[in-house]
Image (spheres, rainbow, N blue to C red):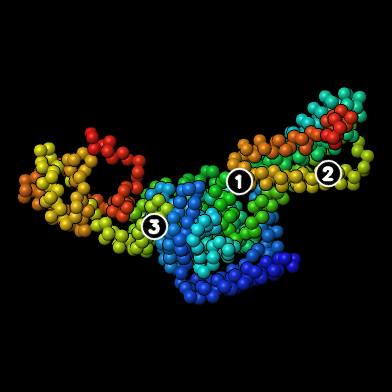
Amino acid sequence: MTTGTSQAEGSSTRAEQAGRDRSLSVSVAVEARGLTKLFGTNRAVDEVDLTVMEDEIFGVLGPNSAGKTTMLNMLATLLTIDGGQARIFGYDVRSEGHAVRQLIGVTGQFASVDENLTARENLWLFGRLQGLSSKNAHSIGDDLLEQFDLMKAARRPISQFSGGMRRRLDLAASLITRPALIFLDEPTTGLDPRTRSQMWDTIRDLVAQGSTIMLTTQYLDEADALAGRIAVIDHGRKVAEGTPSQLKTQIGTSSLRVQMAKGADTADALVLVAEVTRNTPTLSPTNSGFSVTLSDANEAADVLIALRNHKLDITSVTVEQPSLDDVFFALTGHTSETTIPEIETSKS
Amino acid sequence: MTATITFSTPTSRPAARTVNASVSVRDTLRQIMTLAWRALIKMSRNPEQLVDVTFMPILFTLMFGLMFGGALSGSTAHYLPTLIPGIIAMTTITACVAAGIQLREDMDKDVFDRFRSLPIARIAPLAGPMTADLARYAIAASITLTIGIVMGYRPGGGVFGVAAGVVLAVITGWSIAWIFLWIGTKARSAGAVQGISMMIMFPLAFLSNASSPSTAFRDGSRP
């Protein structure tokens, strides 16, 4: 028992230390400096600095295997931190893991609920583990099942659940103790559009109820719709950070793709488009068209009128929202899909 | 016991949060019992996991009793007093291996990540299933004993002696299971756990005078 007491005293000193530091930055939920994770020689997360303020939704945007999940798992004490420092509400993630775990809820990419139990049993289990009485665990669990529209399936085995239902149950399980900070790892990947927008509503509700959310996503539209601020991650490094509108002005608000008619001089068209939009158009892989980012979607008309006036015929035209690929291209100079053999397609 | 510090939160929070620096012994025990409950539910819904503590002891007892009885002790009836305690030890040790395999399977599931992200004692996800496994060892020992009694075994120790013997077997099984549990945390797959564990389990289980007379062992390996 004596050793137990001295250990507790040891952590209390650290906690008090953290308490002092915290008073300097009361409203910071996550603070990471030089966060690094090594898998062998691969720097999965490479010196990332992040600051997430309380009550905001912070989005981490990046393609598959950019290091988003690894970063989240480090912050959630699930992976050891190989370099740098991270604090959650002032508690050091490395040395005060137990304190950190009392403040966070984690919902992973794959539903982390027990397949052998029913939905109701799952919520009861996680409630009990977090110190609720059996009665409270049941009543809070039932409230959450109601809130997430799972009451009808409460007593069914999880193996019969659809993807959307699992995801909802998983999120419900993270909310039992109303954590101050919720980590959501790709909350809508693999969901159909309707379930996806339901999940968005749920996430917005959580923030309205006073939670801070840090989520990862591969979709720009999702980060755009939900996040107040976004960090863009590529190959483990943070390549940009800002509000969605800041990021979008960096890359233009939309992009125009034009396919030229046979015989039309594409080179002439490129010069003309560059004049009108004051942006450099990129030649399409087949050399028969181009795409250009527009700072304003109305510029599309200006481009088309200019082409018409110069008797440069086109066969098709599309105006698109910038995709994650465009963001990536603008920020890193390469596309997020490294597997597309661009040289091969240009030969056809 | 635990140092408690109050986490100052803005008034918009559901409640002011209390953050504990460590888990109290009482909370740890409760978490272990909760996870033992989970393991028992799992057992009851996957009864095939109980084959090694139900059919195996029956098979072992019948096989050894009928096959080796005559050779080792002249007759099956004479062999039973040696065989039954031996089989009880053997089946509990065999049943231990499952602890490591099941832990490995559990750790490979995403639900284990959730356990790790919760503010619970780090030992609880290991000790919970281990506590539930006590039931497995008790089943193995009881079934062996019952088969033995049906075959004509009349233990000399009386009810208390027999009960103490079963308890000893259960405690032994539980203690040895931690070895396999440790292998479970280290090995990469459930298959690997099984392979490594078998290597340790076989000498432990069969290097015994229940399967062969002590005189048949070479010096140094005699049990």
Estimate the spatial distance between the alpha carbons at disc 1 and disc 2, rounded to whole Å. Answer: 29 Å
Callout 2 environment at 10 Å: few (<14), some (14 to 19), or many (20+)? many
* Foreground tag (1 vs 2): 1
Chain identifier of the residue bearing label 3 in the image: A
According to the picture, the residue beneath numbered tag 3 turns out to be A238
A158 or B23: nearer the viewer: B23
Rendering coords of residue A106 (x, y %):
51, 57
- The three-letter amino acid code for the residue at tag 1 is Asp
Give the position of the C terminus of chain B as an image quadrant: top right
A338 or B83: nearer the viewer: A338
Residue A142 seen in render = no
- The residue sitting at 66% across, 48% down in the picture is B39
Q: Circle 1 — which element?
A: helix
Q: Is residue B160 left or right of residue A180?
A: right
According to the picture, the residue beneath numbered tag 1 turns out to be B106
The verdict on a common chain for dots 1 and 2 is yes
Q: Is residue B76 left or right of residue A278?
A: right
According to the picture, the residue beneath numbered tag 2 turns out to be B166
Examine the rendered structure and indicate whether residue A306 appears above or below residue A53.
above
Tell me if label 3 and label 1 are in contact, CB under 8 Å: no
- The residue sitting at 13% across, 55% down in the picture is A276
Callout 1 environment at 10 Å: few (<14), some (14 to 19), or many (20+)? some
Q: Circle 2 — which element?
A: helix
Chain identifier of the residue bearing label 1 in the image: B
- The residue sitting at 71% across, 47% down in the picture is B178
- The three-letter amino acid code for the residue at tag 2 is Val
